[in-house]
C-alpha cells in the first residue's frame, strides 16, 4: 500500500516500462512518488533496456535515468553512462539500495551500484 503522507517535496520516479510490483515497493518510501508517465516530469526514470536511456532523455533531458539490470555484464556500466544514464542499479536488490540510488541520482551524484562495476 503506498504511503499516504508524503513529504512536501517528494521525488517523482518513472518506471519505463511500468512495473506494478516495483511501483508498490517504491511507493512505500515516504519521499518517493511513482508517476505514470513522462508528462508528470519525473526527477528520475528507471529503465530496463539500454536503448530506453536515450528515449527518456529525448523526452526530458533534465530527467536522471538509471538503468536496471539483473547482473553485471562486462562494459554495461560504461555503456549506460555513455548513453547518458546517471548510473546502473540492481533490479532485484534491496529496495532501500534502489531508493538510495534514486535519491543520489536526483542530487546529481553517481548512482551506480558498486557490485556492478567490479571486473
Image (cartoon, rainbow, N blue to C red):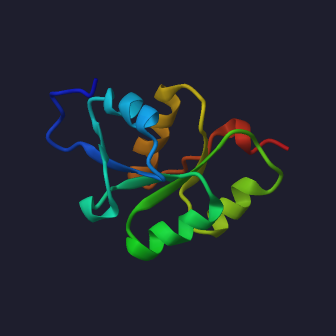
Rendering quarter of residue 119: top right
**Left or right for 106, reference 46:** left
Return the residue found at the far bottom.
58
Q: Which residue occupies the foreground of this view, 92 or 110?
A: 92
**99 left or right of 9 in image:** right
| Image quadrant where one finds the N terminus | top left
Q: Position of residue 39 (x, y in %)?
A: 27, 64
Which residue is pictured at 72% across the width and 60% down the height? 78
Q: Decide which of 104, 65 is in the foreground and name it.
A: 65
The answer to whether residue 114 is seen in the rendering is yes
Question: In this rendering, is residue 26 above or below 19?
Answer: above
Could you say where residue 21 lies in the image, as x and y percent from the top left?
Answer: 44, 32
Write the residue at 80% across / 57% down.
75
Dividing the picture into quadrants, the one containing residue 26 is top left
Q: What residue do we see at 15% from left, 28% from top?
A: 5
- Rendered view: 94 above or below 39: above
Q: Position of residue 109 (x, y in %)?
A: 48, 51
| Rendering coords of residue 117 (x, y %) | 74, 45
Q: Which sits in the foreground, 1 or 74?
A: 1
Q: Is residue 47 left or right of residue 50?
A: left
* Tally of marks: 0
- Does the image show residue 107? no
In the image, residue 119 sits, relative to residue 98, either above or below, namely below
Amino acid at each position: 500500500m503506498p504511503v499516504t503522507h508524503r513529504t512536501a517535496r517528494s521525488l517523482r520516479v518513472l518506471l519505463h516500462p511500468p512495473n506494478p510490483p516495483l511501483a508498490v515497493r517504491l511507493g512505500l518510501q515516504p519521499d518517493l512518488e511513482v508517476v505514470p508517465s513522462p508528462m508528470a516530469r519525473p526527477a528520475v526514470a528507471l529503465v530496463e533496456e539500454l536503448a530506453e536511456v536515450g528515449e527518456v532523455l529525448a523526452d526530458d533531458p533534465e530527467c536522471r535515468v538509471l538503468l536496471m539490470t539483473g547482473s553485471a555484464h562486462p562494459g554495461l556500466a560504461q555503456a549506460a553512462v555513455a548513453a547518458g544514464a546517471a548510473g546502473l542499479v540492481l533490479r532485484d536488490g534491496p529496495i532501500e539500495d534502489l531508493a538510495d540510488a534514486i535519491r543520489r541520482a536526483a542530487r546529481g551524484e553517481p548512482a551506480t551500484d558498486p557490485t556492478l562495476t567490479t571486473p
